[in-house]
């Protein structure tokens, strides 16, 4: 009697993805560059675990049998709910509250790590992704906000994006001040801010409609407006478009002015960082200055149309960081870089750094010798590996070709007997034919290969790679 074995299907969960060597190497280069810049400002790295107690996350409290609305959760052996972190700010709040007495004030840290969202995936929207955050906790000074902006400028420029980005700043205090002057009911605040947030896309006419009764778009769909009166709309738009003499009297304006003065004295002029009242982030989250870093160069979308790349980072001041743990208000400001989105931009611009070319040492008849040669090259700063598969020569060549190796090094018995070594330039030569099955056939294909004295190995490899670069 035969029994069937039920085998699992090799498949990814929805909303997750595998990443190959090229993307991993490019992301590592980007994160290393960002980390160097952040550490040069005195920010120190912090790592927190992937799991937190669910009630510590704050945004998604366990109000059902399994608290999985927005987060991935499970119960531990103490019968307490744990959840995978959905961002890096909630763990920071827990860490600061837990260690508050021992931390320097202000406390400055950066963190890079994976986060998880239990949400419906879509094109370019994954359930697992990487964030890179920097925060200053314990300072209410606008200088802390200005420093983050200068640091992000330096980081983007270290990645090769000078002249290719713009950072825009605004203030939630300032926007709230505008609404108070216009005597906007607090119930309508969210609708008004959402309308103002669409200024870049809809312009003055569209925003005025959304502040009033509503707006019908090109498809005929109607969006209900905030329901303000015409005088309220006029006053808001006059203040919002910086067309008034009494802006300086509005709360939050002085912070923006201080930030701008600090930036100007540091050499960060409006071509890099500028006030833009159209930047509106986190309607219930941010309490002061808010900022957004946008890339300004065009890229092609899925339809082949050229569009501006847009936002790659954002943040602002949030002064209620640890209050839910301690009841004490602690000022904080931070900025988060979308790692995957910024990486996409860098790859489109060819700014992801270079992985060292690979050298494969073919193991013809002495694997121990191949490892020695690989180590000799690594000690000189090259990236080299010894082949550890079959002894069949054709398979070794196919492997080197499939690995994208720049060079293949041959040191068989004949080479050793004559004190020579053979180096094949796989980039300069044509792709190795899959029909080659013997070393003799390969040695006859002498385009882009050299045989030199064994003592000339390092010098020749360096010259061949330099020519390749």
Image (spheres, rainbow, N blue to C red):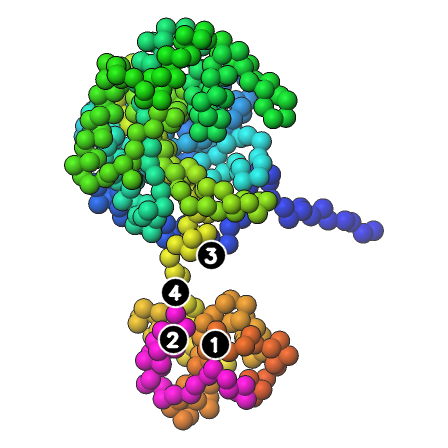
Cβ atoms under marks 1 and 2 closer than 8 Å = yes
Mark nearer the N terminus (2 vs 3)? 3
Which residue carries the number 4 mark? 356
Tell me where the magenta segment starts and ends, as one range.
Answer: 443-469
Residue 420 at least partly seen: yes
Q: Is residue 47 visible?
A: no
**Residue placed farthest to the left in the image?**
265
Q: Which quadrant holds residue 265?
A: top left
Q: Point out the frontmost of discs 1 and 4.
A: 1
Q: Residue furthest right?
A: 1
Q: Main secondary structure of the magenta part?
A: helix
Kindly state the secondary structure of the residue where label 2 is placed: helix
Horizontal arrangement in the rendering, residue 267 relative to residue 319 (left or right): left
On whether residue 463 falls in the magenta region, the answer is yes
Query: Mark 1 packing: few (<14 Cα in 10 Å), some, or many (20+)?
Result: some
Percent x, y for residue 428?
A: 47, 76
Query: Considering depth in this image, is 53 or 424 the residue closer to the camera?
Result: 424
Residue at the disc numbered 3: 22
How far apart marks 3 and 1 lie (CA) works out to 21 Å
């Amino acid at each position: 009697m035969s029994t069937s074995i039920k085998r699992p299907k090799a498949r990814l969960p929805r909303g997750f993805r595998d990443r190959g060597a090229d993307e991993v190497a490019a992301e590592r280069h980007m994160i290393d560059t960002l980390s160097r810049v952040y550490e040069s400002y005195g920010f120190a790295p912090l790592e927190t675990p992937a799991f937190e107690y669910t009630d510590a996350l704050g945004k998604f409290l366990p109000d059902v049998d399994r608290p999985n609305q927005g987060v991935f959760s499970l119960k531990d052996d103490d019968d307490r709910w744990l959840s995978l972190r959905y961002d890096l700010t909630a763990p920071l709040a827990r860490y600061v509250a837990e260690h508050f007495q021992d931390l320097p004030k202000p406390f400055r840290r950066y963190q890079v790590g994976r986060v998880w969202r239990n949400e419906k995936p879509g094109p370019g929207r994954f359930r697992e992704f990487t964030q890179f955050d920097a925060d200053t906790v314990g300072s209410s000074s606008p200088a802390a906000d200005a420093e983050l902006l200068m640091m992000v400028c330096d980081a983007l420029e270290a990645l090769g994006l000078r002249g290719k980005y713009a950072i825009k700043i605004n203030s939630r205090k300032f926007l709230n001040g505008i609404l108070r002057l216009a005597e906007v009911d607090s119930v309508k605040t969210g609708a008004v801010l959402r309308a103002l947030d669409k200024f870049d896309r809809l312009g003055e006419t569209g925003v005025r409609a959304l502040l009033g009764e509503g707006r019908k778009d090109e498809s005929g769909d109607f969006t209900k407006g905030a329901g303000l009166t015409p005088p309220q709309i006029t006053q808001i738009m006059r203040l919002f478009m910086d067309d008034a003499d009494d802006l300086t009297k509005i709360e939050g304006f002085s912070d923006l002015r201080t930030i701008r003065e600090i930036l100007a004295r540091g050499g960060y002029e409006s071509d890099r960082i500028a006030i833009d009242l159209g930047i509106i982030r986190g309607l219930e989250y941010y309490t002061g200055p808010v900022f957004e870093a946008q890339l300004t160069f065009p890229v092609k979308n899925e339809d082949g149309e050229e569009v501006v790349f847009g936002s790659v980072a954002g943040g602002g001041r949030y002064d209620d960081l640890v209050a839910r743990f301690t009841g004490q208000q602690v000022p904080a400001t931070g900025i988060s870089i979308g790692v995957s989105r910024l990486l996409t931009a860098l790859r489109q611009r060819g700014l992801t750094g270079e992985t060292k070319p690979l050298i494969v040492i073919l193991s013809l008849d002495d694997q121990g010798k191949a490892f020695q040669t690989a180590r000799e090259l690594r000690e000189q700063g090259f990236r080299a590996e010894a082949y550890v598969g079959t002894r069949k020569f054709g398979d070794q060549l196919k492997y080197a070709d499939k690995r994208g190796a720049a060079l293949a090094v041959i040191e068989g018995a004949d080479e050793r007997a004559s004190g020579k070594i053979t180096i094949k330039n796989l980039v300069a030569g044509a792709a190795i034919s899959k029909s080659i099955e013997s070393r003799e056939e390969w040695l006859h294909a002498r385009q882009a290969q050299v045989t030199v004295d064994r003592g000339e190995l390092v010098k020749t490899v360096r010259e061949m790679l330099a020519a390749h670069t």
